[in-house]
Amino acid sequence: MNIEPIRQRLSRFTPKHWPEDLVSAGVVRNIEVRDGTLHISLVLPFAQHRLADELQSLNAELCALAGAQVVDWQLHTEVATLAHANEAPAVAGVRNIIAVSSGKGGVGKSTTAVNLALALSRMGARVGLLDADVYGPSIPMMLGVAEARPASDDGKTMAPVKAHGICANSIGFLVGATDATVWRGPMASKALSQILRETRWGELDYLVVDLPPGTGDIQLTIAQQVPTTAAVVVTTPQNVALADAVKGINMFGKVNIPVLGVIENMSYHQCSQCGHQESLFGEGGGEHLCSEHGVPLLGRMPLNATLCRQMDAGTPVVAAEPEGEITGLYLNMAERLAAGLYFSGKAVPSTLYTRQV
């Protein structure tokens, strides 16, 4: 059978958040018809969530072209290892490292890092989360594992703490909950590097790193000593937050770490009774920032009291409400993030694994 008409139709289909069609992206691996079924095999180099549903819209047209009764979409994921931004040695088993940053505190950066990590995991990826805020680690509490301690069977390396389907490590697991980490910058940077490299992460597609706010020693460590692939900047619509977000974008530019995009938190408040949306902290700031600096706006998140309570309780929204509206927003941002990371990067040879999704 001539499969060229089918390939041509696939070449005109561009999934949501992709800059290229299926054929141009190189994900179509095999097309054949057997026993009245059109089998199409796709191998995806990054995590996706809604692609399987999107593809169903092609079924009727493809069946007519192939003279088939049904379409069997065979989706596999082989997450690509992308070139990182510096010469730092790779972390064993970790394919891609994504830094989540903010210019100032209190903009929801850690909440974003946790829920993005959980969203990537929900999309079928193997995900780790590193709490790089050595002065104010919040990830243990947000994941609901504040009392956990990393196990070490050799006295040299640590096993990460497992929570909600991801693995995590933090200085917060190693010191008391009320102990103050009184370290100078070089000492804090050394501690971060040790936690990163002495943790047995296993095979990870993505390691999400929750940075402390600002542009100090820890950020320079990430830029120079950690094989970072790309970064995300979190802000609110307030002018003071936007001004600091600009500093973060410029910092990553100076150290040659690509910025995948900006996430605007507290964009609006939505009334739980009538649904009316009100911009409490200004509006349009995220769009203007992205337009001015040539980076995508990955998403806008509402000011949500339930989300805050869930984080305090150690039950992040993506885990607590997997079908909820807020979870849908995080999944949408994670899809943009994964696609943007792949299409803006350069894949390098690596030992990949394949999982059917």
Image: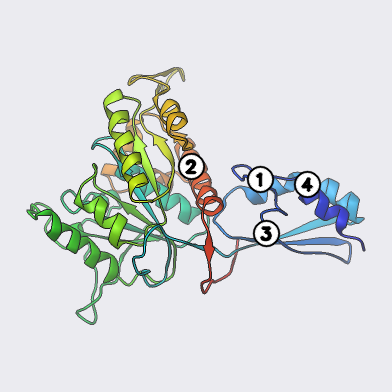
Label 2 to label 3: alpha-carbon separation:
22 Å
Residue 353: % across, % down: 54, 71
| Distance Cα–Cα, label 3 vs label 1 | 12 Å
**Earlier sequence position, callout 2 versus callout 3:** 3
Asked whether residue 316 is in view, the answer is no
Asked which quadrant contains residue 263, the reply is top left
Instruction: Judge whether 289 appears above or below 198 on screen.
Output: above
Image marks 1 and 2: residues in contact by CB distance under 8 Å? no
Amino acid residing under circle 2: Met
Q: Which mark is residue 270?
A: none
Q: Residue at x 19, y 59 (%)?
A: 189
Give the residue type that dot 3 points to.
Val
| Mark 3 vs 4, N-terminal side | 3
Label pair 3/1, CB-CB below 8 angstroms: no
Residue kind at label 1, given as amino acid type? Pro
Residue picked out by circle 2: 333
Above or below residue 144? Residue 79 is below
Quote the CA–CA distance across marks 3 and 4: 16 Å
Q: Amino acid at mark 4?
A: Leu
Residue carrying label 1: 15
Find residue 206 and report its horizontal and vertical position in percent: 43, 59
- Element assignment for label 4: helix
Mark 1 surroundings: few (<14), some (14-19) or many (≥20) residues within 10 A: some
Task: Give 88 or 340, whichever is nearer the viewer.
Answer: 88
Marks 4 and 2 in Cβ contact (< 8 Å): no
Q: Compute the Cα span from label 4 to label 2.
A: 25 Å
Residue for badge 3: 27
Of callouts 3 and 1, which one flags the residue occurring earlier in the amino acid sequence?
1
Q: Which mark is residue 58?
A: 4
Q: Is residue 61 left or right of residue 47?
A: right
- Residue 65 lies, in percent from the top left, at 90, 51
Residue 129 position within the rendered picture, expressed as x and y whole percent measured from the top left: 34, 57
